[in-house]
Image (tube, helix red, strand yellow):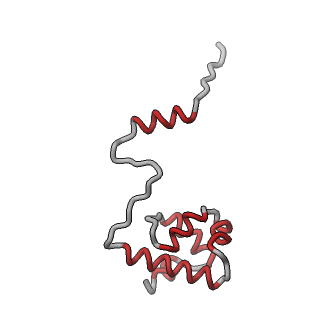
């Protein structure tokens, strides 16, 4: 028996996945930050910015060093992105600071 090879057209596959997605899932749109958490998110962003400025780096340089997009990093500092800890951990690792130490004064 011979091999059967199927070539997939990625835009078509993504279009089909989008059409048949569960209605509660949105693509590439971050969840909005609850007004109850906005003060905390801005505090987290300010703390991250302080750490970066202490190393005299631009946000673009630091984003490149830790491997996240400059847009994501900028939004993180501004406190306008609903991020996951997986985004925050490389920032803290670069600065040599633990989660508990980072959140201690927030």
Nearer to us in this view, 99 or 91: 91
Classify 7 as above or below 76: above
Point 65% across, 75% down: residue: 58
66 with respect to 20 (left or right): right
Q: Position of residue 48 (x, y in %)?
A: 54, 78
Instruction: Work out whether residue 83 or residue 72 is closer to the camera in this orientation and state it.
Output: 72
Front-most of residues 20 and 94? 20
Q: Quadrant of the N terminus?
A: top right
What residue appears at the point 50 percent right and 37 percent down from the top-left corner?
14
At which x and y percent is residue 23?
A: 34, 43
Quarter of the rendering containing residue 10: top right
Q: Residue furthest top?
A: 1
Quadrant of res 21: top left
Q: What residue appears at the point 62 percent right and 82 percent down from the top-left corner?
A: 53
- What is the quadrant of the C terminus in the image? bottom left
Side (left or right) of 76 relative to 34: right
Where's residue 55, x and y in %?
66, 82
């Amino acid at each position: 028996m011979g091999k059967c090879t199927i070539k997939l057209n990625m835009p078509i596959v993504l279009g089909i996945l989008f059409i048949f997605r569960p209605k509660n899932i949105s693509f590439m749109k971050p969840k909005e930050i609850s007004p109850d958490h906005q003060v905390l998110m801005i505090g987290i962003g300010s703390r991250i910015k302080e750490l970066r400025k202490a190393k005299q780096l631009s946000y673009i340089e630091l984003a490149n060093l830790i491997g996240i997009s400059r847009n994501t990093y900028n939004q993180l500092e501004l406190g306008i992105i609903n991020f996951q800890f997986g985004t925050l951990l490389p920032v803290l690792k670069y600065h040599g600071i633990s989660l508990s130490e980072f959140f201690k004064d927030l």
